[in-house]
Image (cartoon, grey):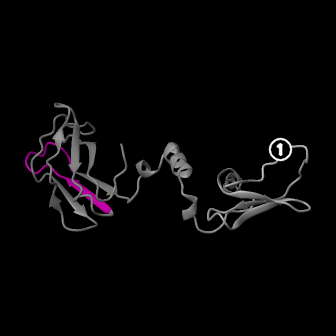
Amino acid sequence: MSEPKRGVAYTLPVALLSVANPGMFQSNPTIAAGDFQLSKDGGALTNLTNVPAVTPAGSPILWLVLTAAEMTADLVSIVGSDQAGNEWGPMHLALHTTVRTVDDVPTALQNADTLLMRDWTLVSGGPPNYSVWNALRFLRNVWSLVAGTPPVLHVKAEDGTTDAWTRNVTTNGAALPVTGVS
């Protein structure tokens, strides 16, 4: 069952204790409008919008269906009391809502997709020298090899002009040189 989230409709099952058979759940409890009331953050009790229903029929399982409006509180208190028949005993249930639940945590796949599609030009600040971001800059960004003793590799930041990092390189005159990527 998901956690109760503030401002989001919430459905939960409960079972009521029998008055005639203490210690046993009441099978197929009779429920009427007004038997279940709700208080938001200690406010006045009001009837639930939806009269709870027994499902499956004949069972002791009673489903409370709370609307999004009923869930707009940090603490939702539900009080149940058999108003007519004294068939089942009183109950109280406290729901502490939250703005985010475990269901809101991104999956590993969502995190990977977000990371892989991140526009580096929107990142502020600079990464540490030996970071994955700086390593990948050499594959993606503009770089150039500047002749000298020793030659120096200049890997550019996302603006294409500022050096992100530089390193001295070793050359081989017999090899076919790569002098830059643009």
* 42, above or below 108, in the image: below
Which residues, given as a range, are shown in magenta? 75-90
| Magenta highlight: main SS | loop
Quadrant (top left/top right/bottom left/bottom right) for the N terminus = top left
Using the rendered view, name the quadrant where residue 118 is placed: bottom right
| Label 1 element class | loop
Q: Label 1, on which residue?
A: 176
* 39, above or below 176, in the image: below
Residue in the image at 9% along x and 45% along y: 85
Q: Nearer the viewer, residue 24 or 46?
A: 46
* 29, above or below 70, in the image: above
81 within the magenta span: yes
Using the rendered view, name the quadrant where residue 60 is placed: top left
The image position of residue 174, as x and y in percent, is 91, 43
Q: Nearer the viewer, residue 134 or 12?
A: 134
Using the rendered view, name the quadrant where residue 126 is placed: bottom right
Relative to 144, 43 lies left or right: left
Residue in the image at 37% along x and 50% along y: 3
18 within the magenta span: no
The image position of residue 102, as x and y in percent, is 44, 50
Relative to 59, 138 lies left or right: right
The image position of residue 83, as x and y in percent, is 10, 51
